[in-house]
Image: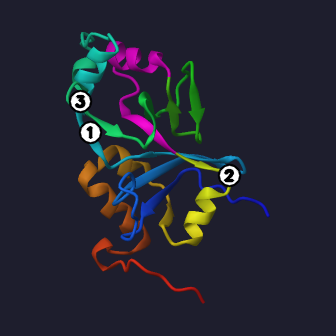
């Protein structure tokens, strides 16, 4: 059976999601193939801003063109895997040392050069910085979908970059025409 790729889709955690790492989360899927899936939670800011993160990785926020505009931007909990590593979801794609290009518009970068560019040049201007990512082994995400753990919808990047974090889950639900409050936590199978 061929795997249908959910790359560039949102995963919306169903209300019955028991895993506290994913309860009430909106996850952007960056890669999905027969080997598994990788995504970043985009609606769970940590109690850390970019100024603090930059300080921790020894990048002084001095760039007049960029760094200071990012100082107060929150850092997100991207998922429970490799929480000690930073990942930058950004557009435009650009050319970085370690990037996963998701499509022509957006990429996920894990190399230091993107943080340095944000500080020095203010680019890429649209970015979401996360610690950790969400990962699924081969067939695991498909199994979770069959168990009604998630809803999926094609991603709208404006939700990631233009909508406040606390409103992103609701905005993604609206893409499906569903109100999270009215969503039932159990589903039947016909």
| Above/below status of 47 relative to 187 | above
Select label 1 or label 3 by which is in front: 1
Packing grade of label 1 (10 A; few <14, some 14-19, many >=20) is few
Nearer the camera: disc 2 or disc 3: 2
Q: Is residue 64 left or right of residue 8?
A: left
Point 27% across, 18% down: residue: 67
- Is 82 above or below relative to 152? above
Q: Give the class, few, some or many, for how many residues have Cα within 10 Å of label 2's Cα (few <14, many ≥20).
A: some
The way the protein has been coloured in the rendering is: rainbow
Residue at horizontal 38 percent and vertical 67 percent from the top: 173
116 or 46, which lies in front?
Answer: 46
SS type, badge 3: strand
Please provide percent x and percent y for residue 16. 38, 71
Kindly identify which numbered label has been placed on residue 138: 2
Tell me where the magenta segment starts and ends, as one range.
111-134
Relative to the observer, which residue lies in front, 186 or 87? 186
User: Residue 123, image x and y in percent?
Assistant: 39, 23
Seen as rendered, the residue at the extreme bottom is 190
- In percent of the image, x 29 and y 50: which residue is there? 163
Q: Is residue 16 left or right of residue 143?
A: left
Task: Return the mark for residue 146.
Answer: none
**Front-lying residue, 139 or 39:** 139
Between discs 2 and 1, the one toward the N terminus = 1
Circle 1 residue: 46
Measuring 60% from the left and 56% from the top, which residue is drawn there? 6
Q: Which quadrant does the C terminus fall into?
A: bottom right
Circle number at residue 49 = 3
Give me the C-alpha separation between circle 2 and circle 1: 29 Å
């Amino acid at each position: 059976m061929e795997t249908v790729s959910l790359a560039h889709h949102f995963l919306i955690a169903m209300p019955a999601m028991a895993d506290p790492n994913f309860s009430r989360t909106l996850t952007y899927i960056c890669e999905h193939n027969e080997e598994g899936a990788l995504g970043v939670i985009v609606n769970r800011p940590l109690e850390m801003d970019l100024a603090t993160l930059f300080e921790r990785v020894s990048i002084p926020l001095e760039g007049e063109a960029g760094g200071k505009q990012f100082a107060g931007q929150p850092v997100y909990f991207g998922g429970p895997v490799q929480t000690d590593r930073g990942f930058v979801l950004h557009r435009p794609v650009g050319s970085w040392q370690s990037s996963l290009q998701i499509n022509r518009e957006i990429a996920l970068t894990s190399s230091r050069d993107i943080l340095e560019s944000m500080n020095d040049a203010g680019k890429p201007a649209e970015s979401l910085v996360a610690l950790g990512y969400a990962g699924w082994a081969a067939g695991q995400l498909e199994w979770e979908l069959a168990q009604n753990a998630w809803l999926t919808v094609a991603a709208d990047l404006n939700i990631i970059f233009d909508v406040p974090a606390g409103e992103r889950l609701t905005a993604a639900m609206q893409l499906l025409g569903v109100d999270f409050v009215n969503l039932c936590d159990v589903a039947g199978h016909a």
